[in-house]
Amino acid sequence: MIETKLHDDVLEIVLANAPVNALGAGVRFALSQAIENAQTDVHVRVIVIRGAGKLFSGGADITEFDQPPTGCTLPAVIDAIEASSKPVVAAIHGMALGGGLEIALGCHYRLATRTAKLGLPEVSLGILPGAGGTQRLPRLVGLEAALDMIVSGSPVSASKALEIGLVNQLIDEQGLAANAIAYARTIDAPRRTRDRRVSSDAGAFERFAAANARKIKDLDAPKACIAAIKASVDLPFDEGQALERELFAELVAGAQSTALRHAFFAERAAGKVLGLAKETPRRPITKIGVIGAGTMGGGISMNFLSAGIGVTIVDMTGEALERGVGLMRANYEASARKGRLSSEQVKEAMDLLTPTLDFDALEDCDLIIEAVYENMAVKKEIFARLDDIAKPGAILASNTSYLSIDEIASVTNRPADVLGLHFFSPANVMKLVEVVRGAKTADDVLATGMSIARTIGKVPVVARVCYGFIGNRMLIPRQDNAYAMLLEGATPEQIDRVHTDFGMPMGPLQMIDLAGVDIGWHRDTDRVESLQDALCAAGRWGQKTKAGFYDYDDKRKPTPSPVVAEIIDDFRNRAGLKRRAISDDEIVARTLYTMVNEGAKILEEDIAQRASDIDVVWLYGYGWPRHKGGPMFWADQIGLATVVQGLERYAARIGEDFSIASLLSRRAVDGGSLEK
Ligand code: 3HC
C-alpha cells in the first residue's frame, strides 16, 4: 500500500497501490501510521511523499463510495499531514487528481515534474473535493483560479500550477526521488495552507455563477462546489471543511453522482471485449486508406491526421476529392482560429494527407476504411475491388451505419480481416466508434480495431451485426413514434422540448433536421406517402436547405414553421385521423421507453455485450445527459416496472409489430436490473 525509506534525516513515503495509487482504506491507514510514527522518530527531520509507477495518485478509491466508510477518513489523514511538526513535501509526477491533489495540498511544500498534471476532477463524478480541497486550494492559488479548477474539473499543467502558486518548484522526472529529497533538505519548517486567508472582491461568486450558468444548469455538483469555495472566504477553516463534508455526503448519495460514476466505470468496461484474451496481438497500423471524401470520409481522416498517422484518401472524381480536402482544411483552419491548433499543426496534419483518384494507391495501407453512401451493391463492389488491391493482412473496414458487415465481407476472400468501424457525425468531433464484429472477424482484427480507435482519442464500443447496430437501431422506434405522434396531434416543438428538458442536446426532429430529412427518401418517385415524402417534396430537407421541421436562420437557429404545421394538418386529414392532445407522458413512453425496450432486445440478442455498453453508445454518440447515466442505467433508476407499464399503456399506438422485450418484462417482475 505504501513503502517507506529513510534517507539520513529524510523519510520517503511512496504511495504504492497500482494501477493509479487510489487512496483506499489500506493506503489511508498505512499513510496515517507513517505520519504518526514520523512525529516521534528522532531520525526523521523532513518527510517526502510521492507516488509509485506512472503517477502520484488518481485520488480517492471511487469503488468505495457505495460502501459504508471504513477506517480513517481521507480528510483526517490529510489534516494529520498538515499538522505534522516536521515539514512534509509532495513530489508530483504523472498526475495528482482529486484526493491525490488534496494530499499534496495538505503537504507544506509541493514539487511537480514538468509533464505533471494537477486537478480536482470530482465535479465530473457529481461530487466535490471532499478532503479539504475546496478550502485549501483557494487559500493557495486565490479565488479565481480555484473556482476555475474545481468547477471545471479540468487539470492544469505543471507550468500553470507554478504560475498560480499551486506548486513551489518544478523538478526533473529523471531521479525524481533524489531531486525531491535534495529539495526537502533545504526546508526548515512546516508552512500550513489552512493558516492563509482568501481574499475576495464583492460579487466574485455571482459573476462566476452567471458566466457559467449555461454549463451548470441543473447540475448539483458545480453549485455545491461554488458554495463550498464561498465558505473558504466566509468561514474559518474548520467550519468551511465541515460544510464541505456535509455537501460531499449529500452529493455522493444523490442520483446525479451515482449516474456519473456509472458513466466513468461504463466507459472503462466498454474497452474490454468479452472472450478476447488480453494478450491478443494487434496488427501494426501506420498507414490508413479512406474511400470517399464526403463529410464522413473527411471527418474520419482528420482523426488519424491529427494523431500523426498518414492517410491516403480516394474518391471517384477530382471535384469530389477537391471539395472533401477543402472542407478538411477549412475545419482545421477554423480550429486554428479558435486557438485550438497552431498553424504548424494544421500544416503537419494536412501534409500527412495524400488525396488520389487511384484506387491502387491503397495497396500499402494497413487499414482501409470505406465511407461511401449507404448502398449495399456499391459497398460490395468496393470490397471486391479492395480484395484484389489490399496487401495481405490489411484490415478492411466499413463505416456503414446500418448494413450487414457479414454480407459486405462475403464478397472478399478474407472475411476474417473485415469489420465495421462506425463513426458518428461529425466524425472528427464525436467520440463514439461502434466497432462491429462480423461473424468471421478475427480476434486480432477486432482487438486492433478497438486499440486504433483509442489511439485516435475515440471511445470504442463493440457491437455485433444487426440493422443499425446499437445506436441507430434504438433510434428507429424513437423516430417512427415521433413521426406518428406528429400526425396524431403533437407538434415538433412539443416532442423536441420533452427531450431537451430531459437534457438531450436536441430532440428527435431537430436531429432529423441536422442529419437530413431526405435520408432514406425515395426521391425517384413522385408519390407522397409519408410525412417525410411531403417535407422532402416541399424542399424541406433540414438544416442544409434552412428548412426542415423548423425554419433556420443563418446561424442555424430553429423557429417553428407554419408551413410544416400546414403540411402536417393536411397529411392528417388525408389519412383520416382526428387530432388529439398528446401528453408529455405519452411522448416519454413512445420515444424514450421504446428506446430502452429496443436496448433490451439488443442485449437479449447479444448485439451489445453489456447494458452499460449501450449507455456508453448514447453518452458519446448522441449526447445523452451524462448525469442520467445512459438509457439502460436511467431505466433501472426509474424502475423497469414503470417502463413496462408506460409501454403497455401506449402499446396499441407504438406500432403494429410492437412487442415488449422479454428481458425487460422478466426483470420488471423479478425486480432485477438490465445489467446482465
Ligand atoms: N478509484 C478507483 N479506481 C480507479 C480510480 C479511482 N480514483 N481511478 C482509476 N481507477 C481504475 C479504473 O477503473 C481502471 O480499472 P480497470 O482496469 O479495472 O478498468 C484502472 O483504475 C485504470 O484506470 P484508467 O483505465 O482510467 O487508466 P488511465 O491510465 O487511462 O487513466 C487516470 C488514469 C487519469 C487516473 C484515470 O483513471 C482517472 O481519471 N481516474 C479518476 C480520477 C478522479 O476522478 N479522481 C477523483 C476521485 S474522487 C476523490 O478523490 C474524492 C475526494 O475529493 C474525497
Image (cartoon, grey):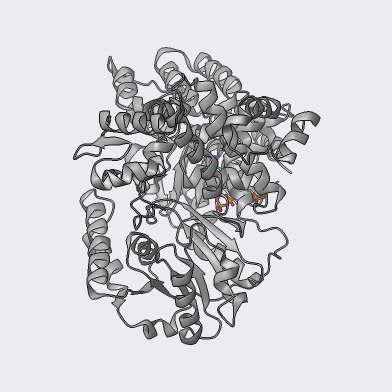
| Residue sitting at x 28%, y 51% | 340
Classify residue 664 by image quadrant: top right
Locate residue 463, reporting x and y percent: 61, 56
Q: In the image, is residue 55 above or below residue 414?
A: above
How many circles with numbers are drawn on the protein? 0
From the viewer's side, name the closer residue of 576 and 560: 576
From the viewer's side, name the closer residue of 7 and 309: 309
| Residue sitting at x 37%, y 73% | 311
Locate residue 394, reporting x and y percent: 52, 79
Give the quadrant of ligand 1.
Answer: top right
Outermost right residue: 670
Whether residue 620 sits left or right of residue 491 in the image: it is right
From the viewer's side, name the closer residue of 373 and 673: 373
Locate residue 307, reporting x and y percent: 40, 64
Q: Does residue 12 show up?
A: no
| Residue sitting at x 60%, y 39% | 656
Q: In the image, is residue 518 above or below residue 246?
A: below
Locate residue 571, reporting x and y percent: 38, 34
Classify residue 442 by image quadrant: bottom right
Q: Does residue 570 show up?
A: yes
From the viewer's side, name the closer residue of 431 and 223: 431
Q: In the image, is residue 102 above or below residue 232?
A: below
Whether residue 655 sits left or right of residue 183 in the image: it is right
Q: Which quarter of the rendering shows the C terminus? A: top right
Q: In the image, is residue 27 above or below residue 151?
A: below
